[in-house]
Image: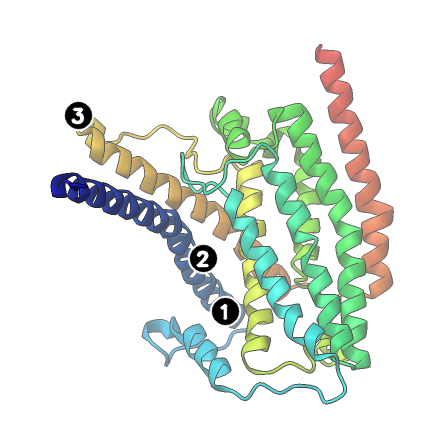
């Protein structure tokens, strides 16, 4: 039997090229995810720095100023310190629940970033149920908090976990009803990209902020409650529960809770931008310099950059409002928090949904 060496070499080269293509495709699958994670990390560091600077200005004191220029590296220094601290475990707690809880919280919030568009075609997963996927995934985070509180074998931690679960259930329903109003009447879609494109048809006046003002207010209040920000930070109230579900945590696990709170604030701000403020659309006329000179490739990059900057500017505006709210308003009692969710926001959001659907029927 005679074997042609040229055929063998051709087959080997073909199989090698195919394997290289698979590896290349696999690498390019993970590149956008890594870029998104890097951008989210930088965004969280900026939020921590902004919160410290704004709180210092509101309280008329000097904020962070030694770690880096203007203290911008203070959050990075704090994170490094938490990484190097000893990781303590409760002797009589459920170590499996204690260890898994922080990871569930962080992962559930990170997955929500998959459906957030930062610009035209700058979204990892443009799903038809994008907004409701965020709501469904965000409801997993309180389960992790409850697991952490129960696994700590501490009454303060368990009370904080129960409060987190009760608060999440109370405010997720008005939040969902507000999103449903937008999907039914305004955009006829639950895709985040479609919602932004629908608002861009009418410019600045087409923002859902003007079409759904009641839903906008309910959504902002519910988002603050979902992020457990003051005046809704009952699950970790220092005066009552020491630190709530975080009481027994230290080191990297405590850092995960710290990271999750700011990740949740950033994702909520981005969804406020997408649902009510027109997303990446600038909504005002501007002249693209590369398009003026007929440079199409640079014009695409320029438009993409403008879209990302506009999205972040709108999101950080909401973050500024939430930070000033934290250092301005006092903490509510637990009964007041639940009454606000069930007796006020839920009926208002239901009424807003009925008004939206009835106006849609009339327009038919």
Residue shown at the point (49%, 67%) measured from the top left? 48
* 3 or 2: mark nearer the eye: 2
Q: CA distance from mark 3 to mark 2?
A: 34 Å
Q: Is residue 126 left or right of residue 26?
A: right
Circle 3 or circle 1, nearest the eye: 3
Q: Is residue 311 left or right of residue 148?
A: left
Q: Residues within 10 Å of mark 3 (few under 14, many from 20)?
A: few
Relative placement, left or right, of 53 versus 107 is left
The answer to whether 259 appears left or right of 226 in the picture is left
Location of residue 44 in the rendering, given as x and y in whole percent from the top left corner: 47, 62
Q: Is residue 166 visible?
A: yes
Looking at the image, tell me whether mark 1 or mark 2 is earlier in sequence order. Answer: 2
Looking at the image, which is closer to me, 177 or 348? 177
Mark 3, residue position: 294
Question: x%, y% of residue 103?
Answer: 60, 67
Asked if the residue under mark 2 is in contact with the one under mark 1, i.e. CB atoms within 8 Å, the reply is no
């Amino acid at each position: 039997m005679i074997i042609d060496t040229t055929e063998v070499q051709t087959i080997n080269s073909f199989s090698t090229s195919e394997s290289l293509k698979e590896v290349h495709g696999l690498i390019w699958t993970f590149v956008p995810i890594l870029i998104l994670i890097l951008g989210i990390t930088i965004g969280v560091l900026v939020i921590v720095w902004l919160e410290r600077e704004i709180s210092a200005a509101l309280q008329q004191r000097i904020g962070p100023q030694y770690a880096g220029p203007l203290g911008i590296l203070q959050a990075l220094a704090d994170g490094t310190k938490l990484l190097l601290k000893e990781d303590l475990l409760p002797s009589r707690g459920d170590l499996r629940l204690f260890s898994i809880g922080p990871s569930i919280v962080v992962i559930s919030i990170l997955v929500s970033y998959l459906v957030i568009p930062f610009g035209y075609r700058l979204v990892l997963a443009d799903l038809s149920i994008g907004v409701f996927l965020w709501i469904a995934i965000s409801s997993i985070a309180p389960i992790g908090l409850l697991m952490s509180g129960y696994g700590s074998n501490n009454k303060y931690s368990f009370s904080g976990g129960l409060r987190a679960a009760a608060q999440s259930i109370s405010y997720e329903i008005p939040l969902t009803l507000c999103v449903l109003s937008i999907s039914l009447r305004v955009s006829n879609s639950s895709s985040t990209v479609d919602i932004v494109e629908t608002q861009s048809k009418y410019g600045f006046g087409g923002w859902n902020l003007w079409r759904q003002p009641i839903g906008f207010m309910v959504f902002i209040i519910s988002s603050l409650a979902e992020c457990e920000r003051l005046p809704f930070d009952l699950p970790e109230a220092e005066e009552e529960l020491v630190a709530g579900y975080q009481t027994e945590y230290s080191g990297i696990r405590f850092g995960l809770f710290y990271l999750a709170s700011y990740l949740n604030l950033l994702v909520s701000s981005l969804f406020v931008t997408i649902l009510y403020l027109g997303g990446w659309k600038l909504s005002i006329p501007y002249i693209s310099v590369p398009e003026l000179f007929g440079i199409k490739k640079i014009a695409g990059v320029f438009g993409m950059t403008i879209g990302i900057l506009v999205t972040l500017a709108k999101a950080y505006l909401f973050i500024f409002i939430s930070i000033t709210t934290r250092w301005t308003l006092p903490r509510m009692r637990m009964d007041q928090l639940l009454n606000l969710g069930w007796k006020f926001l839920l009926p208002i959001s239901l009424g807003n949904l009925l008004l939206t659907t009835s106006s849609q029927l009339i327009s038919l």
